[in-house]
Image (cartoon, helix red, strand yellow):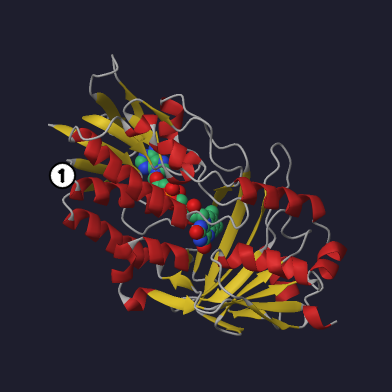
Amino acid sequence: MIYDLVVVGSSFAGLACARAAALGGSRVLVVDKRPAAGSRLHTTGMIVKDAVDSIPWLRDVPGELVRRIEGVRLYAPNLRHVDLHAPGYYFWATDMPRLMQWMVGLVQAAGAEVRFGALFTSVAREREHDPWSVTLGSGETVLCHYVVGADGPHSRVAKALGLSQNRQFLFGVEHEYAQAELEPGYLHCFIDSELAPGYIGWGFAGVGVTQVGLARRVTPGSHQGRVDLAAFLRKTEGRVTPRGTPVSIRAGMIPCGGRLPRVARPGALLVGDAAGLVSPATAGGIHAALRVGEEAGVAVARYIAGKVPDPAAWLPHQYPSYRFKRALRALFEWTQGDWTYNWLLRTRAMRGICERIYFHTQGAPMLRGSAGQG
Ligand SMILES: Cc1cc2nc3c(=O)[nH]c(=O)nc-3n(C[C@H](O)[C@H](O)[C@H](O)COP(=O)(O)OP(=O)(O)OC[C@H]3O[C@@H](n4cnc5c(N)ncnc54)[C@H](O)[C@@H]3O)c2cc1C
């Protein structure tokens, strides 16, 4: 049998794409190297309100898999803080393993086939309009008319198809604790140029666990990728204070260079992290992965049905460019010094920028906190 679409990767981008394409009438196969849905996760899994607003099926997520967080407590390097809120805005902390299982069920119910323990190794075809031959680690070859690479930051699909690959990364590590002391209802974020150069540390009460993490820029060829979570916990003692040993650990690379230049060729598209679709300002990629994944699935199904030209020729022009957020990242990198942020967080202008970054939408933010009072 020839599939209409093979999607490599069964995370946010791949599942959103597969579901939309299957609902559009395509025969879809999703392959993932993970042993099972929700295993070996590498994300914090915080989902922004904008995603919930723009992706209708997210509103069907069972309530016990998510927890609303309505404010951000942003700490300067000297640990003075400012509280950021925007009326009506929230983030979802998620039970990521169970959310992934729920999403896979949704995709299967839409009619797509999902195979775990299936490593993608290569893809090729003789001529432009021939079907693709997708080769899996088992040696099996699968034929299809279209290929979508949703296989994350180090996309093997991109490599096999001669497309662009991510080169700039942050590296993040997160521990989950069964017990911790911290003020719930806030995403606690810590700026520290030594412990988290190029990014931040964070902690929050999630679904049944407390998640505490730290990310930093990776400088190729140096040791700067080391993440010292123990030092971070010592510093944040009294603000985010976990008890006991972690019940699970997640770690991974986050592309932060913005959208890649070549993300498609006839009959093939990259989506999600594989295409560099992560906000360089927040390092959040779930919203873009879901949205662009879904748009790709709709477009491929319409192409297979002969209703639109190959989406490889037009869809990438609609991918987010992150021009403004790339500029914010450059500004953050350029200004990052502890004294700078100890001072900057006391200014109204800086807090305004932070609100725009965290709350995306045009809400009317309210400020409270200690950094603004000094
Ligand atoms: C530590 C950390 C914390 C983060 N926290 C957040 C957050 O809170 N909020 C947010 O919005 N973003 C966050 N991000 C970013 C976010 O996780 C990603 O942007 C998002 O997961 C991208 O989804 P994706 O579907 O494109 O790729 P991924 O989630 O990376 O999924 C890729 C999938 O492809 C599979 N795969 C890879 N190679 C192969 C292969 N050769 N064969 C078969 N399968 C393959 C993988 O097993 C995986 O299932 C975080 C990232 C990290 C590393």
Q: Is residue 204 visible?
A: yes
Q: Looking at the image, which is closer to me, 41 or 333? A: 333
**Residue located 77% across and 83% down the image:** 370
- Position above or below: 96 against 220: below
Residue drawn at 73 percent across, 83 percent down: 369
Quarter occupied by the C terminus: bottom right
Where is residue 54? Give x, y as percent: 38, 61
Query: Residue drawn at (47%, 28%), measured in percent from left and top?
Result: 163
Q: Is residue 221 above or below residue 371?
A: above
Label 1, secondary structure: give it. Answer: loop
Q: Determine whether 352 is above or below 264 in the image.
A: below
- Amino acid carrying mark 1 in the image: Gly
Q: List the residue tagged with mark 1.
A: 25
Decide which of 189, 218 is in the foreground and name it: 189
* Nearer the observer, 101 or 35: 101
Left or right of 230 on screen, residue 343? right
Please say whether residue 137 is visible from this viewpoint.
Answer: no
**Apparent side of residue 30 relative to residue 40 in the rendered image (left or right):** left
- Count of marks overlaid on the render: 1
Task: Tell me which corner region of the image, top left, top right, bottom left or bottom right, holds residue 84.
Answer: bottom right
Percent of width and height locating residue 294: 33, 50
**Which residue is most to the top?**
127
Q: In the image, is 321 to the left or to the right of 5?
A: right
Q: Position of residue 138 (x, y in %)?
A: 28, 34
Residue 180 falls in which quadrant of the image?
bottom right
Quadrant of the rendered image containing residue 364: bottom right
Q: Residues within 10 Å of mark 1 (few under 14, many from 20)?
A: some
Pinpoint residue 327: horizontal percent, then vertical percent.
69, 48
Q: Vertically, is 50 above or below 241?
A: above
